[in-house]
Image (cartoon, rainbow, N blue to C red):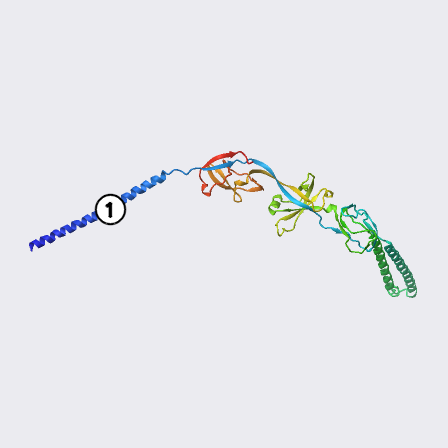
């Protein structure tokens, strides 16, 4: 029995000792893990702190110079007439005389007689109208004399009474006066028709085409050709709305005109703008009045240069410097920055900007978005935009 008790005591002591050893091992593992974590953490921070700065971004820059600039727009237009005028008589009859000016391409002066219609029928009509007027006036004179006699007789018989309208022949007089006015109108119309046997225009013009010959029987209102007023010739030039905005205000600006690419030039002035955009091109028409319209012909192509407003104190830079619509990249303190600018004018591969602080220069070559804020390595620098 004693031996058995001793064995149990020994096993109990061994079991307690093993438990304490296990607990110590666990604590040692935890402490070692904490030490390793601390060492690795501090070592990583030192590595991050010691990491070298990224390499500088290579850039090319330009240093724009402040300058004045005048907007200039180049356009192409064509000569046109607001409307062709038909060669149409207002009275009918047989053509008895035709001027040499009534030929395609011929010029004529204002009020020059282009052709005549036989006037004899219209002269007879004038004579008849004159006779009708004389008869109406005679009848009116007779009625007025009779009315005066009636008034005198009335005063003798009824001195204290007002004469009646019938006794004074007032209705008959009113009708006679109306007949006189009608006869006068007939005479005026007859004279006007006689005058219209000579076909002329109140402007200096040119004949587009003509189908008038002597001996031809023409009818009133029928077209026998067409002409145009030389002074009304104008140049129609389509322009993009953006370019029109560059000229604002466009009306009143002077234009230099070159006809058909030749060395012949003349001056013009913008007199109005189109009321709407072309449904296909989305352009607006400018109408230019030339100073020497007699040198032009409808349908001719014209090269146009319009001088716009003077823009003072701006900077010219390559269009490639723009990022988007109104940003540029600049170098300031050797680092790349992006700034907004105001674009005053665009000229193909150049832009005219309102003056701004561009630091060490404006970047002309593309740089990635993640380069903003980085150091820049300037490879080339121009003193001013070319």
- Can residue 267 be seen at all in this image of the molecule? yes
Horizontal arrangement in the rendering, residue 267 relative to residue 197 (left or right): left
Picture quadrant of residue 4: bottom left
Where does the image place residue 147, in percent across and percent down from the top left?
90, 62
Q: In the image, what residue occupies the spot 29% across and 43% down?
A: 38
Along the line of sight, the residue nearer the viewer: 320 or 147: 320
Q: How many marks?
A: 1
Q: State the residue position of label 1.
A: 29
In the rendering, at what x and y percent does residue 193 appear? 83, 55
Split into 4 quadrants, where in the image is the C terminus? top right
Figure quadrant of residue 126: bottom right
Label 1 crowd bin: few (<14), some (14–19), many (20+), radius 10 Å: few
Residue 109 sits in which quadrant?
top right
Residue in the image at 74% along x and 46% along y: 230
Instruction: Name, please, the residue furthest toward the left.
Output: 2
Residue closest to the eye, 265 or 213: 213
Image coordinates for residue 191, horizontal then vertical, percent? 85, 54
* Residue 14: x %, y % from top left: 14, 50
Q: Is residue 12 left or right of residue 180?
A: left
Q: Residue at x 9, y 54 (%)?
A: 5
Quarter of the figure that contains the N terminus: bottom left
Q: Is residue 360 left or right of residue 239?
A: left
Q: Nearer the viewer, residue 113 or 335?
A: 113
Residue 383 drawn above or below residue 28: above
Farthest residue to the top: give it: 383
Label 1 SS: helix
């Amino acid at each position: 029995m004693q031996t058995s008790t001793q064995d149990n005591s020994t096993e109990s002591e061994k079991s307690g000792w093993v438990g304490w050893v296990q607990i110590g091992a666990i604590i040692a593992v935890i402490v070692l893990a904490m030490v390793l974590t601390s060492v690795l953490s501090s070592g990583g921070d030192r590595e991050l702190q010691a990491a070298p700065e990224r390499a500088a971004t290579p850039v090319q820059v330009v240093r724009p110079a402040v300058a004045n600039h005048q907007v200039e727009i180049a356009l192409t237009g064509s000569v046109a007439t607001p409307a062709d005028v038909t060669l149409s008589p207002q009275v009918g009859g047989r053509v008895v005389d035709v001027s040499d000016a009534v030929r395609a391409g011929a010029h004529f002066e204002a009020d020059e007689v282009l052709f005549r219609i036989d006037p004899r029928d219209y002269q007879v009509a004038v004579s008849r109208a004159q006779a009708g007027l004389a008869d109406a006036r005679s009848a009116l004179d007779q009625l007025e004399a009779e009315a005066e006699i009636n008034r005198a007789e009335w005063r003798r018989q009824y001195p204290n009474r007002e004469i009646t309208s019938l006794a004074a022949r007032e209705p008959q007089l009113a009708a006679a006066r109306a007949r006189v006015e009608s006869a006068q109108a007939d005479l005026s119309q007859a004279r006007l028709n006689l005058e219209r046997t000579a076909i002329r225009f109140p402007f200096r013009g040119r004949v587009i085409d003509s189908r008038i010959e002597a001996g031809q029987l023409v009818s009133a209102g029928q077209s026998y050709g067409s002409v145009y007023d030389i002074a009304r010739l104008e140049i129609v030039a389509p322009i993009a709305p953006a370019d029109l905005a560059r000229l604002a205000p466009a009306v009143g600006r002077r234009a230099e005109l070159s006809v058909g690419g030749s060395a012949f030039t003349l001056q013009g002035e913008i007199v109005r703008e189109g009321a709407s955009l072309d449904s296909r091109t989305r352009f607006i028409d400018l109408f230019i009045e030339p100073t020497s319209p007699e040198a032009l012909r409808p349908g001719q192509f014209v090269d146009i240069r319009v001088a716009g407003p003077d823009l003072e104190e701006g900077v010219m830079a390559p269009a490639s410097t723009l990022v988007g619509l109104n940003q540029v990249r600049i170098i300031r303190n050797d680092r790349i920055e992006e700034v907004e600018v105001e674009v005053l004018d665009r000229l193909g591969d150049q832009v005219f900007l309102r003056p701004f602080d561009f630091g060490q220069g404006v970047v002309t070559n593309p740089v990635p978005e993640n380069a903003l804020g980085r150091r820049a390595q300037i490879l080339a620098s121009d003193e001013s935009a070319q």
